[in-house]
């Protein structure tokens, strides 16, 4: 738990393909060995094509891509708090 791993290697050695298999975004060829990610393991993957700004760190790039998700999560928490407080009207949702 809490481990973070990086995959480093020269161009063309299969880093992105390996991560694609781990995240399920790339299918293995029929008959190829497959690696399964264990239960409870969460795989986060920032595609190299997602890096848009050379002036930001990888963490800043990752966070920039999560803005909409964070907004939705905040809205959901607000709705949960309203419902827990007994508010049942349209405005609570």
Image (cartoon, rainbow, N blue to C red):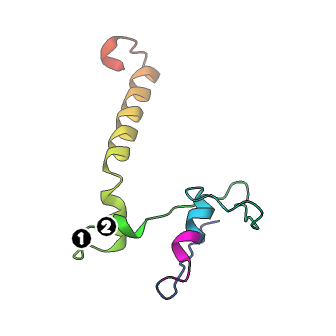
- For residue 65, what is the image quadrant? bottom left
Which residue does the numbered mark 1 point to in the structure image? 53
The percent coordinates of residue 34 (x first, y second) are 74, 64
Considering depth in this image, is 44 or 16 the residue closer to the camera? 16
Q: Is residue 24 above or below residue 33?
A: above
- For residue 63, what is the image quadrant? bottom left
| Magenta-highlighted residues | 12-17
Q: Can residue 49 be found in the magenta stretch? A: no
Q: Residue at x 35, y 64 (%)?
A: 50
The percent coordinates of residue 60 (x first, y second) are 31, 67
Q: Is residue 85 above or below residue 10?
A: above
Which residue does the numbered mark 2 point to in the structure image? 60
Considering depth in this image, is 25 or 28 the residue closer to the camera? 28
The quadrant the N terminus occupies is bottom right
Considering depth in this image, is 6 or 15 the residue closer to the camera? 15
The quadrant the C terminus occupies is top left
């Amino acid at each position: 738990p809490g481990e973070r791993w990086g995959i480093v290697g020269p161009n063309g050695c299969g880093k992105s393909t390996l991560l694609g298999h781990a995240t399920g975004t790339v299918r293995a060829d029929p008959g190829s060995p497959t690696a399964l990610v264990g239960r409870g393991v969460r795989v986060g993957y920032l595609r190299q094509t997602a890096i848009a700004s050379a002036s930001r760190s990888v963490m800043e790039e990752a966070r920039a891509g999560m803005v909409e998700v964070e907004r939705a999560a905040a809205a959901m928490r607000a709705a949960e708090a309203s419902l827990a407080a007994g508010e049942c009207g349209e405005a609570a949702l």
